[in-house]
Image (cartoon, rainbow, N blue to C red):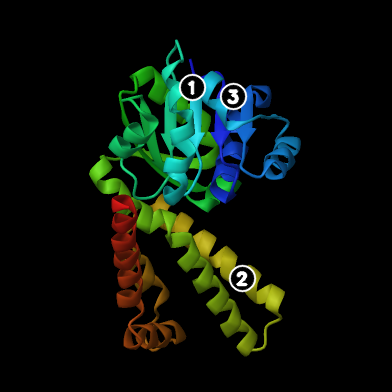
Amino acid sequence: MLKTIGFLGCGNMGGAIARAVCKAADPQNVYLANRTAAKAEKLAAELGCNTTINDEVAGRCDLIFLAVKPQMMEALLTPLKFTLAERPGRFVLCSMAAGLPISRIQELAGEDYPVIRIMPNTPASVGEGMIQYCSSHVTAEEEAEFCKLMAPAGRLDPVPEALIDAASCVSGCGPAWVYQFIEALADGGVACGLPRAKAQEYAAQMVLGSAKLVLESGKHPGELKDAVCSPGGSTIQGVRVLEEQGFRGAVMDAVLTAYDRTKEMGKG
């Protein structure tokens, strides 16, 4: 049903999804096209899949990933309208552009084609992504097959389109802030005398393990936080300083600011 898979764009996010898809599908059925051909060729050599041009992907692939930034979507799809319109069989478009609703993708593509809209994140490249998705005109069989193809990327969760921008600002933007946090923790460790490599390893593994404990225990993060804070101990003093510095409020403001920007991009 979704046998041939094409990627229009092989940047960081497109490349991450292509790596995941090539674990679930035969790489010989995967086709990569990119504005800079050398980038597609390098990724294809790594994955054992094929390179081609945009028009070829638009004309032959059953599932077409639109892996470009929101501001580039119109320039990508406008030249492909005729090719898509001339196709005799069914195909599915998959957009990962923040802020662009399905209706806008269909408008730019020229018709109300089946569309899946996803919000992935960069941890998908190591199989630990959080990918929200919604769809229009997609059959249950196509959705099931899509989820099977995407499974190596991480967790998938269907959400109403009205929530997908908010979701993207938590799990899509969130890795950047987590990396800042890991870097800051490591800097603190270095300030205390740890070697840089050790401090970074400890910080990263701590974040990984803490996240796993939240997911697997089902406990509220506040309860897990309390379990680390012994009366009169070191941890509660650190918690006090973070509260004084507005740590939680700053994180919430980051999500809200990213959400506002996402909405702006959708209007563009």
Residue extending farthest top:
88
Q: Earlier in the sequence, mark 3 or mark 1?
A: 3
- Position of residue 105 in the picture relative to residue 188 (left or right): left
Q: Residue at x 32, y 37 (%)?
A: 102
Amino acid at pointer 3: Glu
SS assignment at label 1: helix
Which numbered disc flags the more N-terminal residue, 2 or 1?
A: 1
Mark nearest the camera among 2 and 1 is 1
Reading the image, the residue beneath label 3 is: 56
Query: Callout 3: few (<14), some (14-19), or many (20+) C-alpha neighbours within 10 Å?
Result: some
Residue at label 1? 83
Foreground label between 3 and 2: 3
* Disc 1 residue type (three-letter): Thr
Decide if residue 76 is in sight here: yes
**Residue under label 2:** 202
Q: Secondary structure at mark 3?
A: helix
Residue 150 in the figure: left or right of residue 158: right
The residues tagged by marks 3 and 2 sit, at their Cα atoms, a distance apart of 47 Å
Give the residue drawn at x 57%, y 31%: 54
Q: Position of residue 60 (x, y in %)?
A: 55, 19
The answer to whether the residues at label 3 and label 1 have Cβ atoms under 8 Å apart is: no
Instruction: Tell me where residue 195 appears, x and y as whole percent.
Output: 71, 81
Q: Are marks 2 and 1 in contact (CB under 8 Å)?
A: no
Q: As rendered, which of 14 and 174 lies closer to the eye?
A: 14
Dot 2 amino acid type: Tyr
